[in-house]
Image (cartoon, rainbow, N blue to C red):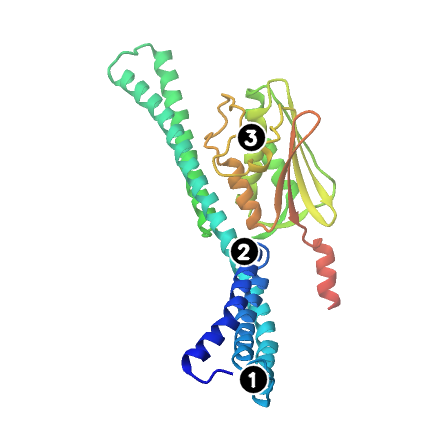
Amino acid sequence: MPTDLLGLIGFALAGSLPVTALGALAMRLTHNRSLTGSMVLLVLIPTLATLVGVVAVSGMMFTDELRRIAVVLAVVTIVAVPAAIVLGRAQARKTVWERQMREQERAAERSRRELVAWVSHDLRTPLAGIRAMGEALVDGVIDQPETVERYANRIVLETNRLSTMVDDLFEMSKINSGALRLQLEPVDLRELVDEVAAANQPTAVRAGVSLVAHQPDSEIPVSASDRALTRVLTNLVANAIEHTPSGGRIEICSGIRDGRAFTQVTDTGPGIAPEDLPRIFEVAYRGTAARSSTDIGSNSGMGLAIAAGLIQAHHGDISAHNQDLGCRFEIRLPLLPHPETAASARTSS
């Protein structure tokens, strides 16, 4: 057993350095596997290095003092290893959460850039048309009454489209910022479907598309915002009309399945490319197929994203699936108890 200071240091280093080196190697080999395992190794390495260093300094003589030190280190290990496991798991969850948050932030930033690019393009097009037609009217280049009327109608149409795009941007900003607050109340889903179908009939007729609604006889009670849910259904129907060729058919049906209310909008259009389906509800994502030229809305690329955000605010979900012919969008909402059932339950209680 060394008695001088340099001898103590030398023996301590000779005992602890190999343990530390092996621990560092183990850390390097397992750093991508388990954060909890890494935390345990961080606890064991200094403990074992201390024990081996003390044994080396003692000259492998297991005295009472060495046994006391070994007992202390064993107790420390028993206490520290479970704590390291708990802390490692907590840190792993935090790391995963932070990684998910970073991915969501990157996805949101990518969506914002795409939205700015799409909206800038879509705003520029109608504005250029309005400017050209307005300048033609002001300069007197157009003097035929029927042409003046056609230009004026076109200016009104493009202005309405710009107004709808601004509304879409405002709605989308509220959804993305978490500032959307809906006043939910009992609503019969059938009534909203009938209203949306009736409101979109003229557009469907103009596009040469058949639009029909199938409704059950019994009430479909849901808790919803009348305005918001009407907008969701309108966006889905408008999207179906836009992508259904002339002579096609769009069906809206609603009902109750597996204890939830549902509404399906099915069209006979070309469907959605498989690579586009996972991103169809992203902001400003339009997929690989070009939009049709039917004048049915703002064409801002936000209709489906707004629908998804509003349905999420209703605690429901929305999905899109290709059919043998065309595509089907489906929304599912929590079902309220039937009014008569709820009333009887309140009476019995």
Mark sitting on residue 264? none
* Circles 3, 2 touching at the beta carbon (< 8 Å): no
**For discs 1 and 2, the disc positioned in front in the rendered view:** 1
Judging by the rendered image, the residue that carries numbered circle 1 is: 69
| Mark 3 → mark 2, Cα distance in angstroms | 37 Å
Residue at 58% x, 53% y is: 185
Q: Mark 3 — residue?
A: 239
Label 2 Cα crowd, 10 Å radius (few <14 / some 14-19 / many 20+): few
The residue located at (25%, 18%) in the rendering is: 138
Tell me how far mark 3 sits from mark 1, CA to CA: 75 Å
Picture coordinates of residue 277 (x, y %)? 60, 34
Image check: 281 left or right of 331?
left
Which residue corresponds to mark 2? 96
Q: Which of marks 3 and 1 is in front?
A: 1
**Above or below, comparing residue 71 to residue 153 in the picture:** below
> In which quadrant is the C terminus drawn?
bottom right
First in sequence: mark 3 or mark 1?
A: 1
Among numbered discs 3 and 2, the one appearing first in the sequence: 2
* Three-letter amino acid code of the residue under disc 2: Val
